[in-house]
Amino acid sequence: LPGVSLSALPLLLPSIILLFFLGWSLAMLAGILNTYFRDVQHLMEIALQMLFYLSPILYSPDMFANRGGLASCLNYNPVTYLLALVRVPVMEGHAASGATYGICTLLVLVVGALSLLCLARVGRKIVFWI
């Protein structure tokens, strides 16, 4: 891409660390839920497909800036901010905003705390659910 600087790529390191811990926490939650409720896997497939189309993965969030309801849907979608952690340094050549890092850090902390709480609660019983 013309105009994109490779000097912004080291800015991806904090984003990769945040995404790693979010993925780890979500994997622990999904594992616990899938062990207890066997149908969670199929529900997750449907929910993730819906989330894919509601998130700005295939399109830019700027395309819906003047669309009212669609723009507010993107503003409340946490995947929008997670994608911005990677999209902005790669596509625009500078770091994502501090608010984006703050929202993503808060999301990772909440999901991580929830997964650790679930694991602490069912850690000794989960082997009997298998």
Image: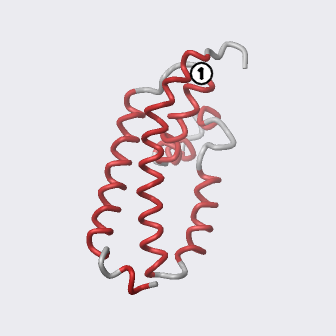
**What amino acid is labelled 1 in the image?**
Glu
Q: From the image, tell me which residue sits under label 1.
A: 92
Residue drawn at (37%, 79%) of the image: 126
Q: Residues within 10 Å of mark 1 (few under 14, many from 20)?
A: some
Of residues 100 and 6, the one nearer the viewer is 6
Q: How many marks?
A: 1
Q: Is residue 48 above or below residue 103?
A: below
Coloring scheme used: secondary structure
| Left or right placement of residue 41 versus residue 25 in this view | right
Q: Quadrant of residue 44?
A: bottom right
Residue drawn at (45%, 59%) of the image: 26
Give the x, y percent position of residue 117: 28, 65
- Looking at the rendered structure, the secondary structure element under dot 1 is helix
Give the x, y percent position of residue 95: 48, 23
Residue drawn at (47%, 35%) of the image: 15
Of residues 85 and 71, the one nearer the viewer is 85
Q: What is the quadrant of the N terminus in the image?
A: top right
| Left or right placement of residue 120 versus residue 31 in this view | left
Which residue, as the protein is rendered here, is positioned at the far right? 1
Q: Is residue 44 above or below residue 1?
A: below
Give the x, y percent position of residue 104: 40, 41
Q: Quadrant of residue 91?
A: top right
Give the x, y percent position of residue 101: 40, 34
